[in-house]
Amino acid sequence: MERYARVFFVPLFPYLCCFSFFFVFGLAANSFQQVPGQRDIMTNLSKNLPTSQTIRVWNSTTDMCHWVGVTCSRANSSVVTSLSLSGFGLSSTNSSVSKFFDLLCLLRDLKSLDLSQNSLTAIPISFFSECSGLSGLESLNLSYNGLTGPLPSFSGFGALQSLDISYNFFHGAVDSGLEKLTGLKLLNLSFNSFNSTIPARVGGATAPSLEVLVLSSNSFHGEIPERIFDYEKLTLLDLSQNNLTGPIPDGIGRLSRLKVLVLSSNHLSGRIPTNLTTIKTLSRFAANQNNFNGSIPRGITTYVSALDLSYNGLTGEIPPDLLSPRNLEFVDLTGNHLQGPIPGSWSQRLYRLRLGNNNLNGSIPSTVGKLSNLTYLELNDNVLGGEISSGLGNCRNLMLLDLSSNRLQGNLTKELGYLAQLVVLKLQHNNIGGGIPDELLFKFRNLSNLDLSKNLLTGVMPPAISNLKKLSVLNLQSNSLYGSIPASIGSLENLMELQLGNNKLSGTVPRMPKSLRMTLNLRGNLFNGLIPSYLGDLSQLEILDLSSNKFSGEVPTSLATIQSLIELNLSDNQLSGVLPNFPKFVKVVTTGNKDLIISNSSSNTNPSSHTIPTKRKQNILLIIMVIIGAVIGMGLTAAVLLLIISKRFYRVEDEGPQPEENLPQVISGCFITANGIHRSSIDFTKTMEMVSNPANIIMKSRFSTYYKAVMPNGVSYSVKKLNWTDKIFQTGNHERFGRELEVLGRLSNSNVMIPLAYVLTEDSAYLFYEHVHKGTVFDFLHKDSENALDWPSRYTIALGVAQGLTFLHGCDQPVILLDLSTKSVRLKSVKEPQIGDIELCKVIDPSKSTGSFSMVAGSVGYIPPEYAYTMRITMAGNAYSFGVILLELLTGKPPMCQGIELAKWALSYSTRLEEREKILDSRVCKASLAVHSQMLSVLKVALACVSISPEARPKMRSVLRMLFNAR
């Protein structure tokens, strides 16, 4: 039997092998059919992209490995290992979003997934809890979306080495969601709303592998946990812009591989740990805007190349070795209580040194002349004495030199003239005497800002001042300069602000450059004779101060035609005659001119000391009445004669008013809005009549004039005029301007003023808006001090402006504002702000503003400090301007108060928590404990926005989130 079995089996063996092969193959085939190939997965993904973009970025007819953002394995070109869908317009509102994430989970070989910079507000929970297919994923980037809720559990992504969920709206605690990530090397949770203490463990690794930990710009509170320093492989630790308190734990010294440590903008206190000096790898240490006290440890810069300890409470002297290590490049100790001399041993690589707002004494070390790489030197607001070191002339790369508010003596050294790259020179508020040497002026080819005010300068204004072709701000006030203003000043085509007050200047005021648009200050001098009528040619000037001189005669009527004028000071002169009628928005000060007659129509003046005597008034009134009676009689007679003649010789139909010859001639008019009501209401020809009448002016801003235009059907519009004759505006390309406006007109946000239509003439552009505004934020905040705006209204305004600015920065082509201030934000109601002037960044021509663009880009008090030397408008600059607006809302103070910028004033009080109380507006912060607490929370946001460093300022999206969290 056994033999038969063997015989039977042997012949069947080959058949059994074949049967087994086909059985196994069939099972494999079935399995491949159940799990689709990656080509099929990617094809389905391309059909289910939850994107708002209309152009499909993936073409299913081409090799998937050549699709945008797709990377395949080098070993197997049919295996996708990396997907980068950053900026693809992915949106959670798309119905295919759930299917999209389900398909992602099928890409089992995926190592890297980047979904950053999209519009995802939610991701299906199943993606985190059931996505076993991505268990091998090593890098996940979800940053710059709108994801909300608590931190999800990433337990299904155990192989993650890099996780970035920054710039979202996650909140709550950072707890068990990360405990399974044992191999994590990079974790970025910055710019969210986490409001717990920092966990001692941010991963579950027993042998920590974490190298980069970024927790900045949240609301983490409590102390820095000691156990966080168990992550001894850390190279970057960023805990900035939180609410952390207490000292830096001594365990920081265990991070022997640390390269970057950022602790800025917290409430940390105590001393700077000395064991930081032992970390040989540390290259950047920033702990600015905290409450650190005590002295600076010696050796802190032994290995560090960038040190920022500004705005703390540090005391004592600067260690003698602090500035000498050869790798040192950047030091900022601004806003402390340091005293003693500046060390004389400096690193040759040092390019920026900021020691302002301390109590440093002694003289400026002569060794400064050895710093060939020095670009920014700020030693302002100390008690430095002696003469200005001639060695500074060797710092040929210097762009900014600020030695203001010290006790410097001697004369202006001609060696300063060697600084050919200098853009900003600030020497005001010292004891510098002598004259202004010509040698100082011949080589300053790039100088934009020159401030020598409040010194002891004598002599005449040198005609060589005309060599400073890029000068935009010249401030020589409060010196002892005499003689006349050189006629060559008129050639400074970029000059925007001229301050010559409180000197001994005399003679005739020469023609000024028409570029002046901010201030012309001649007060407190010895000018006499008539006020030159050609001052009326300064059509863009905002403030004209001629007070405390000896001007006589009549006030020229041309001054009333200055389009942008908002303040005119004529007080304490010898003026006579009748004051011309100025528009109601111009503040005119005329006290101290006993013979100057103020008409009743000049309601914007202060007539208390110069009203017409009663008897004289009666005589004048009688004469006026007689003249009026005679004119009326003659007019009636002429009218009767004309009526008789017209009836006798010809008859005509009644006609409407004919356009005058001087009306602006329309080159083109275009509707932007699709709203049929506005399209049928707006009459371009009628508008030209309205804007030709100065009586229709309702507001003037720095760059624009607003008119009220009532259409034939009775509907009113605000019409903004941009003057093409101002050379900083783009000219000669009306078609381009129209295209830019049409792009802006397609924007839609309730907190942004969107143009409805525009008209182009040869000299100007006119933009139409709904006439719905009650005034500007500036008006509501500062023009009625007795009725303070309550905090809920101020908070709502802050939120609205932040929403509008976030929207503009988030457009496909970001709109960066040229001039953001409380005067450019208008209110439909107390709680409905709208940002205006959004088109200025499109129509200003930087090439026509060389050397002064930094002064074009913003109003005084709102201009970020870096504009002085970068000449660039940026999102970070807009964030700074918004921070100033927040400070105005918090303090009730204007952006400039007694010559001090509000931002600088607030920062000076921000170093200690108890001093921050002095910043808040006492009229509103005491309304309730809730109001007081919320104002302190918003103050933190404001101080972050006005940070000296542009890189340290939060983006507007994060600002908006932080303001919401302050509720």
Image (cartoon, rainbow, N blue to C red):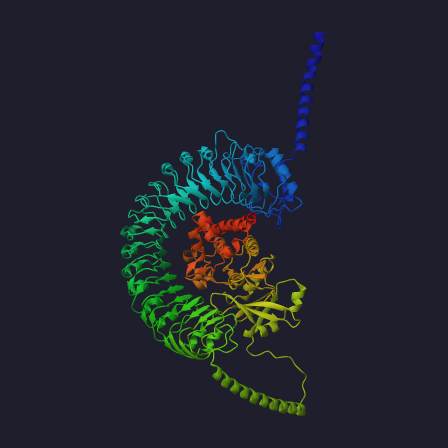
Quarter of the view holding residue 589 = bottom left
Can the viewer see residue 543?
yes
Decide if residue 861 is on the left or right side of residue 780. Answer: left
- Location of the N terminus (image quadrant): top right
Expressed as whole percent of the image width and height from the top left, the position of residue 140 reads 55, 39
Please indicate whether residue 889 sits to the left or right of residue 421 in the image.
right
Q: Quadrant of residue 449?
A: bottom left
Residue 668 or 497: which is nearer the viewer? 497
Q: Is residue 494 visible?
A: no
Q: Position of residue 202 (x, y in %)?
A: 51, 35
Q: Locate residue 279, reporting x and y percent.
A: 38, 37
Residue drawn at (69%, 19%), measured in percent from left and top?
Answer: 15
| Count of picture labels | 0
Determine whether 651 is above or below 680 in the image.
Answer: below
Quarter of the rendering containing residue 486? bottom left
Please state which of residues 175 and 31 is positioned toward the viewer in this rendering. Answer: 175
Residue at position x 50%, y 34% in the image: 201
